[in-house]
Image (cartoon, grey):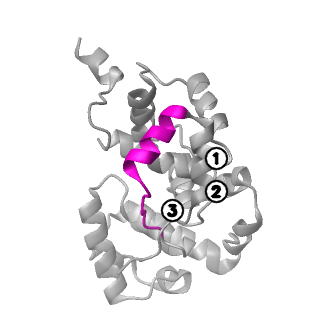
Amino acid sequence: MISDTIFEYGEREIEYLRKADKRLAEVIDKVGMIEKRVIPDLFTALVYSIVGQQIATKAQETIFTRMEQALTITPDRLASIAPDELQRFGISFRKVNYIQSAARKIVSGEFDIDALKGMSDTDVCAQLCSLDGVGVWTAEMLMLFSMQRQDILSYGDLAIQRGLRMLYRHRKIDKFIFERYRRRYSPYGSVASLYIWAVAGGAIEGLSDPGAQKSRN
């Protein structure tokens, strides 16, 4: 079992977003509360994210469950394990290097993972991106689905862009348009993200993607 913890939000965030955006309010009312699993331990979440790079979610969960059953997922354990032992779980050599590099930096004190809790979103993102195999999107997902930061809306997330196109009928979401919505949702961009993902996943019947329609023409 990876985690039973759910991303925490409530009426305060919901009411703010309802008042901030009429269309999002309609989505919130139709979809209701969303239960999204998070992994509270940041190192565990980091390993889970690296394992899942460029593979299906089902494969990611299968591999990670095997890891959890076979060993304790801590920086000390993963820093010292033989690389081929990690590869046996179905993890590529490249990903093993990413995981062990992060683990060793944490163990040596080069990377202070606990210090991230007191940093701003910008600084957390920069610090996480200093690790091998971690880019901005991965850092943002870790901030949302492990640290439970409240104001994460990812421009690099294709499903977020699709959901925004569907909800607001844009053919394309450029940086300027994206920033308009990011400011509108702030300081609860993470909760808005949950509903935008729901839209992208087809939760609202009758909404299509204008951008996809354009590409077919």
The mark that comes first in sequence, 1 or 3, is 1
Q: Give yes or no for contact between labels 3 and 2 (Cβ–Cβ under 8 Å).
A: no
Q: Amino acid at mark 1?
A: Tyr
Is the C terminus in the top left, top right, bottom left or bottom right quadrant? top left
Q: Amino acid at mark 3?
A: Phe
Residue 153 visible somewhere in the drawing = yes
Residues rendered magenta in the picture: 22-38
Mark 2 Cα shell of 10 Å, populated few (<14), some (14-19), many (≥20): few
Q: CA distance from mark 3 to mark 2?
A: 20 Å
Q: Give yes or no for contact between labels 1 and 2 (Cβ–Cβ under 8 Å).
A: yes
Mark 1 Cα shell of 10 Å, populated few (<14), some (14-19), many (≥20): some
Q: Secondary structure at mark 3?
A: helix
Q: CA distance from mark 1 to mark 3?
A: 21 Å
Q: Secondary structure at mark 1?
A: helix
The mark that comes first in sequence, 3 or 2, is 2
- Indicate which disc residue 45 carries: none
Q: Amino acid at mark 2?
A: Arg
Q: Quadrant of residue 199?
A: top left
Q: Nearer the viewer, residue 59 or 19?
A: 19
Left or right: residue 190 versus residue 36 is right
Q: Is residue 37 magenta?
A: yes
Where is residue 104 shown, x and y percent of the image?
58, 75
Give the residue pinned by disc 1.
Answer: 16
Q: Nearer the viewer, residue 10 or 115?
A: 10
Residue 84 visible somewhere in the drawing = no
Give the residue pinned by disc 2.
Answer: 12
Is the N terminus in the top left, top right, bottom left or bottom right quadrant? bottom left
Q: Which residue does the image show at 60% across and 49% down from the upper left?
A: 15
